[in-house]
Amino acid sequence: MPSLERKWWTLIAVCTAIFMLLLDITVVNVALPDIQRSLHSSFADLQWVVDAYSLTLAAFLLTAGVIGDIYGRREVFASGLALFSVASLVCGLSTDSLMLNLARALQGVGGAIMFATSLALIAQAFQGRDRGTAFGIYGGVIGGAVAIGPLIGGAITSAIGWRWIFFVNVPIGVVAIFVTLTRIAKSKDVRARSIDWVGFISFSASLFLLVFALVRGNDEGWSSATTVSFIVAAVVLMIVFFVNEKRAQDPMLDLFLFKRQAFVGVSIVAVAISASIFAMFLYLTLYVQDSLGFAPFAAGVRFLPLTVLAFVVAPFAGRLTVRIHSRYLLGVGMLLITGGLLLMARTQPDSTWTVLLPGFLLAGFGIGMVNPVLASASISVVEPQRSGMASGANNTFRQVGIATGIAILGAVFQSQIVSHTSNVLRQTTVGQAVLHRGGPQLVAAESAGEVREAAAQIPLPAGRAELLHAYHVAFSTTLNHLTIIGAIIAFVGSIGGFLLVRQSDFIVPTGQGAGGGHA
C-alpha cells in the first residue's frame, strides 16, 4: 500500500480512538441523572462513574507509552482499543453501580494505552508540512471531543438511553482495530528495554492517591486523617519514584528530559490548559443546565461556537509550526484562553447564555492554537525512539491537570455555592424559613448540584421559588470566581510557554515538525 495512503489511515485510526476515549471523559456527565435512576445509585456512586475512568487513565499513561516503545506501538495501540471496547460493552450491560464503576476503570486503562501511543504513531507516519497538518487535526479532535461531549451525551441519552453512550463505542472500536492492524506500520524502540516496575508502581500509586485525595477532599474533610494520610503517602511514593528513576538503568521516565527547558515549558502548558479551560467545562455545563435551565442537548448546542472555532483554527496552527517558533504559538494561545476565561467572569443573576459567548470565541481560538503545537512540541524535544515515553508523559500531565483542576475548582465551588446560597436566603423571611427547615439536607443538595430536586420537596411555591432564585444568584457569583481562578492558571501556562520553550532544545530539524521556522 502506498505510503501516502498508509499515513492518512494512521491519522484516521488514531483520531477515531482519541475522539472516542476523550468523549467518554465528558459525555457521561449529562447522563448521570438517568444512570442514577436506572441503577438506584447514590451520589458517591455517581462520582465514581467519572472518577474511576479519570484516575486509571492518568495513572497508566506513562507506563503505557514505554510499553509501546518496547513491544510495538501498533500492537499495543490495538490492544488498548480492544480493552476499551470490551469495557464499554460491560458498562452498557451493567446491572449495578459497582459493575459500572469497575468497567469504567478498565475503560481508563484501555484509554491510557491508546492515548500514550497515539502521538508516536502520528510522528512515525508524517514528516514536514504534513506532520503539522496531522497534528493540527489531532489537536482539533482533542478540543472538539472535550467540548461537544455534553452535546452528544444529551442527544444519545434523550433519544435511545444512557447505555448507548457506551454501546456505540463497540462497533467503532472494532473498525478502528481492523484499520490499525491492516493499515498502520509497525514501530518500536530498537534498543533492548525492560519495564521499570518500581517506577510504574510508585508513580501510579502516588498519582492515584493524590488524585483520590483531591477529588474526595471536600467530602472527607481536608484535615481528616484519610485525606492527610493519602496526600502524605502520595508525596512519599513520588519521592520513591524520582529516586528510583535517577538510579534505574532503564528508567520509565528519563529525568534528563527535565533539564531541557522546553520539556518543562511544554509540561507546564499541558497542565495549565487542562486545569483551566478543560476543567472549567464541567462547571460551565452545570451553569448552563442547572442555573439557566437548559436541557442536556440544548446546553451542548451552546458550546458549539467554542467547538467549531477550535476545529477551524487547529489545522492552521498546525501548519504554522513550521514557520513560527512554538514558544510564541503556545504563549499567545494560552493568553487567549486567559482572556476568554476573564470574559466569562461577567455573569449576573439575570444573564442569558450569550454572556459567555465572547469568552467562548476567544478561548476556542486559543484552544485551537495550543493543542496542535503542544502535541507536536511534546515529542520534538526527544529522540524519535523515545517518542512513546514523551507522548505518555505529556498526556499524563494533561490528565493530572484535568483531575487537579476539577478538584481545586470543585473545592471552591462546593464551599462558595453553599455560603452564597445561604447568604441570599437570609435576606428574606421566606428564605430564612427555607434555610431553617432544610438544614444539612439543603447543604448536601447544594454541594451535589441537586437543588432542583431539593426545591421539589418544599411544599410552598414561594419557598421553592426563593430557593431556586438564591441558588441562581449563588451560581452566577461562584462561576465568576471559578473562571478567574482558571484564568490565573492559564496565564501561568502562557508565561511557561513564552519563557521556557526554547527552540534550541528541539531535536526535529527546522522545517520538519513542530516549532521550526522563524519567529
Image (cartoon, rainbow, N blue to C red):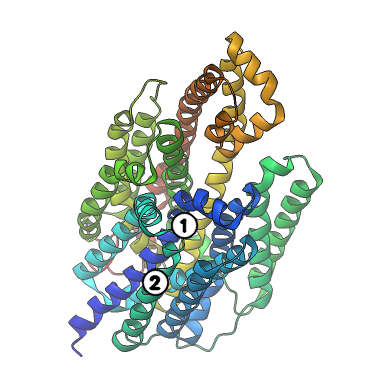
Residue 145 image label: none
Q: In the figure, residue 467 lies in which quadrant?
A: top right
Question: Is 413 located above or below residue 515 in the figure?
Answer: above
Q: Amino acid at mark 1?
A: Ile
Viewer-proximal residue among 491 and 41: 41
Viewer-proximal residue among 379 and 255: 379
Residue 20 in view in this figure = yes
Q: For the residue carrying disc 1, how many other residues have a C-alpha within 10 Å: few (<14), some (14-19), or many (20+)?
A: some
Q: Kindly identify the residue that appears in the image at 59 percent across and 15 percent down.
A: 431
Residue 383 in view in this figure = no
Q: Amino acid at mark 2?
A: Ser
Q: In the figure, residue 380 lies in which quadrant?
A: bottom left
Residue located beneath label 2 in the image: 118
Mark 2 falls on what kind of element?
Answer: helix
Q: Kindly identify the residue that appears in the image at 34 percent across and 85 percent down.
A: 178
Residue located beneath label 1 in the image: 25
Q: In the figure, residue 73 lies in which quadrant?
A: bottom left
Viewer-proximal residue among 198 and 403: 403
The quadrant in which the N terminus is found is bottom left
Q: Kindly identify the residue that appears in the image at 52 percent across and 74 percent down.
A: 64
Asked if the residue under mark 2 is in contact with the one under mark 1, i.e. CB atoms within 8 Å, the reply is no
Q: Residue 459 location in percent, x, y?
A: 59, 24
Q: Residue 66 location in percent, x, y?
A: 52, 76
Question: Is 130 located above or below residue 296 in the figure?
Answer: below
